[in-house]
Amino acid sequence: MKLIDVHSHLQDVAFDEDREKVIENAKLNSVSDIIVSSLDLKDAHKTLEMFKFHSSIHITMGCNPCILDEDEVFRIQKLLRDRIEEIVGIGEIGLDYYYIKGEQRKKQIEIFKSWIRLAKEIDMPLIVHSRSAGKYAIEILLEEECHSVLMHAYDGKVGWALEGADNGFYFSIPPSIEYSIQKQKIAKALSLNNLMLESDSPVLGPCRGERNESANLKYTLKKLSEIKKVPEEEIARVTSENAIKFFDLI
């Protein structure tokens, strides 16, 4: 059985003391591949350097949606173009209406659309953050006719998730499904063919307040099996196949 963690932040300082042990623990818990997402320019350089010798770790490059500095966004996008052979996707990017309010949201939308245009231009998949903005993010993605989309840790309503899924979007489920009624509803409503597994480590673990890691995908797997009434082996197979196809993993 093989699991793929499609969204993590293994470069985070929370793992500075035992990162290699965390990677090994993931392997011991059937996680064959981990996709690490960078969040700003400094983070992108750090991530590219940190994991260049790890064949089981893949990198996506993006920008925290709360960063509204167009110059920094431009520099990240330039680095992405320069290092495109070293990454498997663009993200995370998107909207965050939990932290960003009022007129600043217009700037956030402009930046989001610039990432969508870039993804379409260079033909790369998007990993989308949409905290408290699921409806708005999906509306924009559909308006921009963007279909190679992974909605990570989606916290919105089921109706909009179904709208996205009908247009080929994927949704990745973190271990917080253990206690999140909203995540459980999303998992129940969506077809397994639209689901992947993520940790979003070091956050969104199976226990509130504790550091999360990729090995905890086993909790997502077990809960999805209960909700979908499908054997864990089948959940693992389909979600891994979805990830391999989406990210073009070899």
Image (cartoon, grey):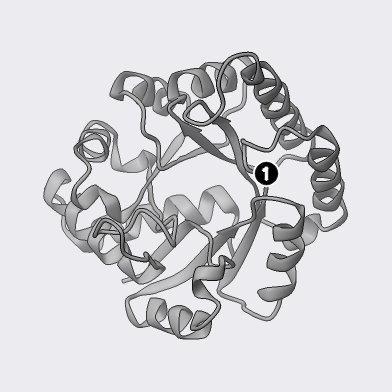
Quarter of the picture holding the N terminus: bottom left
Task: Name the spot of residue 161 as percent of width and height, x first.
Answer: 37, 26
Is 238 situated above or below 217? above
In this picture, residue 205 sits left or right of residue 189: right
Q: Which residue is drawn at 32% across and 63% down?
A: 217
Task: Classify residue 68 by image quadrant.
Answer: top right
Q: Residue at x 55, y 74 (%)?
A: 56
Quarter of the picture holding the C terminus: bottom right
Q: How many marks?
A: 1
Q: Nearer the viewer, residue 136 or 210?
A: 210
Task: Name the spot of residue 181 as percent of width and height, x first.
Answer: 19, 38
Q: What element carries label 1?
A: loop
In this picture, residue 67 sits left or right of residue 165: right
Task: Classify residue 115 by image quadrant.
Answer: top right
In this picture, residue 66 sits left or right of residue 154: right
Q: Residue at x 58, y 15 (%)?
A: 102
Q: Residues within 10 Å of mark 1 (few under 14, many from 20)?
A: many
Which residue position is annotated with label 1?
A: 63
Task: Name the spot of residue 41 as percent of width and height, x first.
Answer: 76, 53
In this picture, residue 210 sits left or right of residue 20: left
Task: Classify residue 5 by image quadrant.
Answer: bottom left
Task: Name the spot of residue 89 as percent of width and height, x first.
Answer: 65, 49
Circle 1: residue type = Cys
